[in-house]
Image (spheres, rainbow, N blue to C red):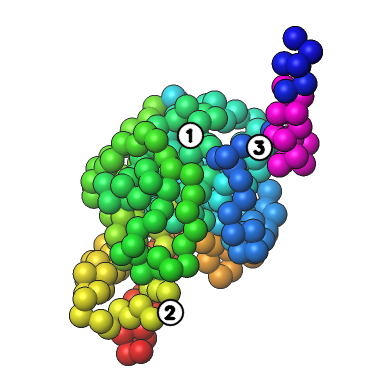
Amino acid sequence: MMRNMAVLTISLAGMMAMGAGKPDDPLTRPIAPDSAKRWLAPQPPVRLHGKTYLVGFGGLNVALIRTGAGLILIDGAVPQAVGDIEAKIRQLGFSIRQVKLILSTEPHFDHAGGIAALARDSGATVIASAPAATVLRQGGGDPEDPQAAWLERFPGVKTLRTVREGEVIRLGDVAVTAHATPGHTLGSMSWSWNSCEGKDCRTIVFAASLNPIAADGWRFADPAHRRFVDAFRTSFGRVKAMPCDMLIASHPRDGDADRLAKLAKARTPHAFADPAACRDYAARAEAALEKKLQE
């Protein structure tokens, strides 16, 4: 018995050493800590509009939607952010166990790295496009991704449900529409839903990145990469055309910090209300792609 107790003590000591007094959790081990310092700038949880909240960070958006049948979470940031996301959900008066669905915008570690842990802690169903689901299951490592040379692997998501362009996901009294917006990754998906705050009703869009960025040596002008260019152009048109009264971008846009500061002071006029936001978002990305094609 004493020998077994000694072995147990040593094993626990090894686990505790990895996490500053906490057992090592393989699903929340830090990824790219230097980059994450920029992305994870502190930001308190905030009610954006109606039943929609932001529980993310200065450089990474994570959204939460309250429904009559539980919560919907959009994106999961990096693994080391999971504890903060769950704490922000608690600050709003909810529990991670109330999250029933987790929607993914793209299978990159900065947006999907925390999803496996969040799904485990909540028991939620993860939803993504079919191309993204393949990459999410294996924890990244897509060799065809334009950023493949830069990307970190992340904890794989075991169980997913896939959705198609235009499919509507319902939970309680909320319906979220899936919008395929490939280009940044071929599996990128944006999401939209209606939100009401009193009589003020808006269509909110959580947009996947449209940034045409690639690792060194990977050129959009290469004929072999034409499908990415075509995918981007389809997505630009789709985002410009979709109903969009408020935009949440997966990485906050320039000016979002000021918008949040204004929102903290007054809810009317709403700092994020902008019917041109999605058109402008797509137009900027379109101009960036045209510049890349000249390189």
Q: Residue at x 23, y 46 (%)?
A: 164
To which residue does mark 3 refer?
A: 24
Question: Residue reaching furthest top?
Answer: 1
Locate the C terminus by quadrant: bottom left
In the depicted view, which residue is nearer to us: 179 or 38?
38
Q: Find out whether residue 227 is within the magenta segment.
A: no
Question: Residue reaching furthest bottom?
Answer: 294
Q: Label 3, label 1: how many angstroms apart (C-alpha)?
A: 18 Å
Q: Which residues are magenta?
A: 8-22
Query: Where is residue 19 shown, x and y percent of the image?
Result: 72, 41
Q: Residue at x 33, y 80 (%)?
A: 219
Query: Principal SS element in the magenta part?
Result: helix
Neighbourhood count class around disc 2 (C-alpha, 10 Å): few under 14, some 14–19, many 20 upward? few
- Residue 100 position by quadrant: top left
Q: Find out whether residue 12 is within the magenta segment.
A: yes
Neighbourhood count class around disc 1 (C-alpha, 10 Å): few under 14, some 14–19, many 20 upward? many
Query: Where is residue 213 shown, x and y percent of the image?
Result: 41, 73
**Residue 229 marker:** none
To which residue does mark 2 refer?
A: 216
Label 3 or label 1, whichever lies nearer to me, is: 3
192 to 158, vertically: above or below? below
